[in-house]
Image (cartoon, rainbow, N blue to C red):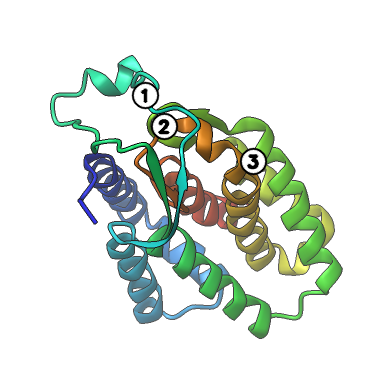
Amino acid sequence: MPSSPLRLLLFIMALAFLAGFVQLGLISIAFDKLGLSPESAYILLLCTLAGSLVNLPLFSLKSESAVPPPIPPELAQLPFFKPLPFTGKTIVAVNVGGAVVPVAFSLFLIAHNPLPPFHIVEAVAVVAAIAHTVSRPIPGIGIGMPMLIVPIAAALIATILNPEQRAPLAYIGGTLGVLIGADLIRLKDIRKLGAPIASIGGAGTFDGVFITGFVAVLLA
């Protein structure tokens, strides 16, 4: 699959956030709350960041429009941004760093922490509803969402539901909530986007999943 300049941009942004977190010592604090060793923490980060550049195609959908919508001006003006050619079909894929890795780590946290199932369901459901509300389709690109609203919501709901296990619950609720609310529920919008690729956990929602997980844990 062709490499997307947008994915490269998001990768660079994620590295910038990571550098800031490392400089402030926030990475160690977040992963310590989750019970991870430093070695395991950096392996997880490496898998997340490297995986953000990998999309695994699942299936394709025929677009409702043969002509893609115009690219948002803020993206079109970027000198290095060059959208992939649109052929009238949208490839639906899953992003490794933005979906596969967070889901796998969430399952790990569920298996290794005493979290009541109804707390997990409630946290994911509330965050998914919020993520769906604040996310929006971006013509020609995919789904975009603000960066800090969902992490704050995930931390608050986790603290209210289970103060003793708020850190893992915040991560689980935040990451799975974003994937469900901003991606899976919005699959019905894909045909209208005119995007060559719609990646679950990628493009506009990668930063949502990536930032939500760590910021929610820090706030919890």
Q: CA distance from mark 3 to mark 2?
A: 22 Å
Q: Position of residue 173 (x, y in %)?
A: 67, 58
- If the image is split into quadrants, where does the C terminus sit? bottom right
Nearest to viewer (mark 1 / mark 3):
1
Q: In terms of secondary structure, where does tag 1 sit? A: loop
Residue 194's disc number: 2
Q: CA distance from mark 1 to mark 3?
A: 29 Å
Nearest to viewer (mark 3 / mark 2):
2
At label 3, the amino acid type is Ala
Task: Determine the residue positioned at 82% across, 65% down.
Answer: 119
Residue 67's disc number: 1
Crowding near pointer 3: few (<14 within 10 Å), some, many (20+)?
Answer: many
Q: In terms of secondary structure, where does tag 3 sit? A: helix
At label 1, the amino acid type is Val
In this orientation, which residue lies closer to the viewer: 210 or 192?
192
> Left or right: 49 with respect to 212?
left
Q: Position of residue 199 (x, y in %)?
A: 43, 51
Is 92 located above or below residue 64 in the figure? below
User: Is residue 146 visible in the rendered structure shown here?
Assistant: no
- If the image is split into quadrants, where does the N terminus sit? bottom left
In this orientation, which residue lies closer to the viewer: 8 or 59?
59
Q: How many marks can you see?
A: 3
Task: Determine the residue positioned at 38% across, 77% down.
Answer: 38
Q: Position of residue 3 (x, y in %)?
A: 20, 50
